[in-house]
Image (cartoon, rainbow, N blue to C red):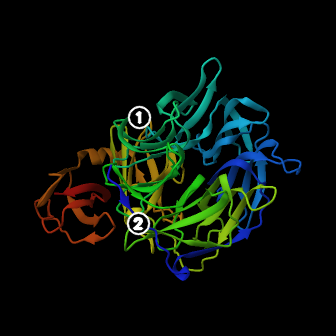
């Protein structure tokens, strides 16, 4: 495998320093913890759920498994509700709106001090005033959860990776897939080979709107593995073996803003040596490692986001180095395409095992830090959970929403495309999007989640004919735009679009329109620029002056506007 080594240089503190101040909260201090962040009450501020263990009696010894949700009032985090006796640690926890009611539900996995033998998985429904357990299933430890819509039906699925004990069958490492049916979840066991003490991500690597998978960790034999699985017509097929990582974390971002998601991986290989790299995506899902020296770090936690307000994704790690807690940032240098180690001040360095997440706690458009782990500098080695506010005063405007929305229907497949989004810092190629789809105006009962491409599709029930949808842009600081103007596709529009034919497509010189008299025509590039075109008397449009690429052609026929994608070859 080809490797590219990136030397991390130290730049002046004034350029690279990120300064933070601790926010006083009412959060518990969690051991062996995991967390997720989402707006559970739809008030515009991100809330937090944590699973882990706590020192309930203050004697310096961890003794109780405890999970709790904290609400954000815009200034600090306050306890909202605990999850009762159905709690886990040494696993993972995630928000998921599995019933599309606009309220974030919860899934969790791990073990409890009340039963250290039978690992558990729980699903909790959000009632608006609290959470009610809906399912209790066998769970896993030393693993993770991911939430996604794999089969494009608008309902969020999830997968769980890690170690599971089966009575009579011993321990096994599996990655299991739970497909959301609307009435429950269908389980596919061992969807792909699972790992222990690793990490996995479900992400579209080649921009075909099909979700792929990357996984690292130790297999059932204790061997280090790292694999890429590409989605081929709904089946995950192994396509690449990466440098094996036995213990570690991965995350994804479009670091170089070329429109394709890259992977950052930090961990230890089978020889217990550090492996740290950003895997650059060639656009087809093939990943090339660029090695990044991060020191002799172990028990790592990892998160991505724009730490220096230049619009490009960076990453932060926490863990242990030579029996000392470390927290480090790595800043992407746009000019030289390298990562430089930053200088971070104002935080308490907490080591692993723990957690780190970047999120905008106070809506000032700068990423703050949720940090958990051991304070190895203290005599009693406590595990702490803290939030640190980003002190940057630089401007970072929220993104602009897409301006051109296009929706077509072919059978039961609804194809969504959009363009015209922009941001003052983040390149258009690196923007992410939240797509919201409902059956009535303003609703989101069909789908609502984040995607990494300016297009998506849904395979919906034949009874669904009228679709209302909008899109928000998301920059590298995780700042959301306002929602776009809502797009609509109704039964009448579907009938008229079936009669409309644009040919040839792809084309190189002219395109012809059949199916109605065109009164107005406009063409836009995928970045939202309006282009100079006109309709000839024979219902043709000359596009020979335009460069090769994909465009949006907007036509007005009988006072109805329809948009089609046009490829110029």
- Residue corresponding to mark 1: 462
- Residue corresponding to mark 2: 421
Q: Residue 142: which numbered mark, if any?
A: none
Of marks 1 and 2, which one's residue comes earlier in the chain? 2
Residue 134 place in picture, x, y as percent: 68, 33
Q: Quick check: 243 left or right of 142?
A: left
Q: Quadrant of the C terminus?
A: bottom left
Question: Which one is nearer the viewer's eye here, 20 or 420?
Answer: 20
Residue 385 place in picture, x, y as percent: 73, 57
Tell me the crowding category of disc 2: few under 14, some 14 to 19, or many 20 or more residues within 10 angstroms, Cα based. many
Residue 153 place in picture, x, y as percent: 45, 39
Residue 351 place in picture, x, y as percent: 67, 57
Evaluate whether residue 569 shows in this view. Answer: yes
In the depicted structure, whether residue 130 falls above or below residue 3: above
Label 1 with label 2: CB-CB less than 8 Å: no
Question: Which one is nearer the viewer's eye here, 360 or 469?
Answer: 360
Evaluate whether residue 45 shows in this view. Answer: no
Q: Residue 169 occupies which quadrant of the picture? A: top right
């Amino acid at each position: 495998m080809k490797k590219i080594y990136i030397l991390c240089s130290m730049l002046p503190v004034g350029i690279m320093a990120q300064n933070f101040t601790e926010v006083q909260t009412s959060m518990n201090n969690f051991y062996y913890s995991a967390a997720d962040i989402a707006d559970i009450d739809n008030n515009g501020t991100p809330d937090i759920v944590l699973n882990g263990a706590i020192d309930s009696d203050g004697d310096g010894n961890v003794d109780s498994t405890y999970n709790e949700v904290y609400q954000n009032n815009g200034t600090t985090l306050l306890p909202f509700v605990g999850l009762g006796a159905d709690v886990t640690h040494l696993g993972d926890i995630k928000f998921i709106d599995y019933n599309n009611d606009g309220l974030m539900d919860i899934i969790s996995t791990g073990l409890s001090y009340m039963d250290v033998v039978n690992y558990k998985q729980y699903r909790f429904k959000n009632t608006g005033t609290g959470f009610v357990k809906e399912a209790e299933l066998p769970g896993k430890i030393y693993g993770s959860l991911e939430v996604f819509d794999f089969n494009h039906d608008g309902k969020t699925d999830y997968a769980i990776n890690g170690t599971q004990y089966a009575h009579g069958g011993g321990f096994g490492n599996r990655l299991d897939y739970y497909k959301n049916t609307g009435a429950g979840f269908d389980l596919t066991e061992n969807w792909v080979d699972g790992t222990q003490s690793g990490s996995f991500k479900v992400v579209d690597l080649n921009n075909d709107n099909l979700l792929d998978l990357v996984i690292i960790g130790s297999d059932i034999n204790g061997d280090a593995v790292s694999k890429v699985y590409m989605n081929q017509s709904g089946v995950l097929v192994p396509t690449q073996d990466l440098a094996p990582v036995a213990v570690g974390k991965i995350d994804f971002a479009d670091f170089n803003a070329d429109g394709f998601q890259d992977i950052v991986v930090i961990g230890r290989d089978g020889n217990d040596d550090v492996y740290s790299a950003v895997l650059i995506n060639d656009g087809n899902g093939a990943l090339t490692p660029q090695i990044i020296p991060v020191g002799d770090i172990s028990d790592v936690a990892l998160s991505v986001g724009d730490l220096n307000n230049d619009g490009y994704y960076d990453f932060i790690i926490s863990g242990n180095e030579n029996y000392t807690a470390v927290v480090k940032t790595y800043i992407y240098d746009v000019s030289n395409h390298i990562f430089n180690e930053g200088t971070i001040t104002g935080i308490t360095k907490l080591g692993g095992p723990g957690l780190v997440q970047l999120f905008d706690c106070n809506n000032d458009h700068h990423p703050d830090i949720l940090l958990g782990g051991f304070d190895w500098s203290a005599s009693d080695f406590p595990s702490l959970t803290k939030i640190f506010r980003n002190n940057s005063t630089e401007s970072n405007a929220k993104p602009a929403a897409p301006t051109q929305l296009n929706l077509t229907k072919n059978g039961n497949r609804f194809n969504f495309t959009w363009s015209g989004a922009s941001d003052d810092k983040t390149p258009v190629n690196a923007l992410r999007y939240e797509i919201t789809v409902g059956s009535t105006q303003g609703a989101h009962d069909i789908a609502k989640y984040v995607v990494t491409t300016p297009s998506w599709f849904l395979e919906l029930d034949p009874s669904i004919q009228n679709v209302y949808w909008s899109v928000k842009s998301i920059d590298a600081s995780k700042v959301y735009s306002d929602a776009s103007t809502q797009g609509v596709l109704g039964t009448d529009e579907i009938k008229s679009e079936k009669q409309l034919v644009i040919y040839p497509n792809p084309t190189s010189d002219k395109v012809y329109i059949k199916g109605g008299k065109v009164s107005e025509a406009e063409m836009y590039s995928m970045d939202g620029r309006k282009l100079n075109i006109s309709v000839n008397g024979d219902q043709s449009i000359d596009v020979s002056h335009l460069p090769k690429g994909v465009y949006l052609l907007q036509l007005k026929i009988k006072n109805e506007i329809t948009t089609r994608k046009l490829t110029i070859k």
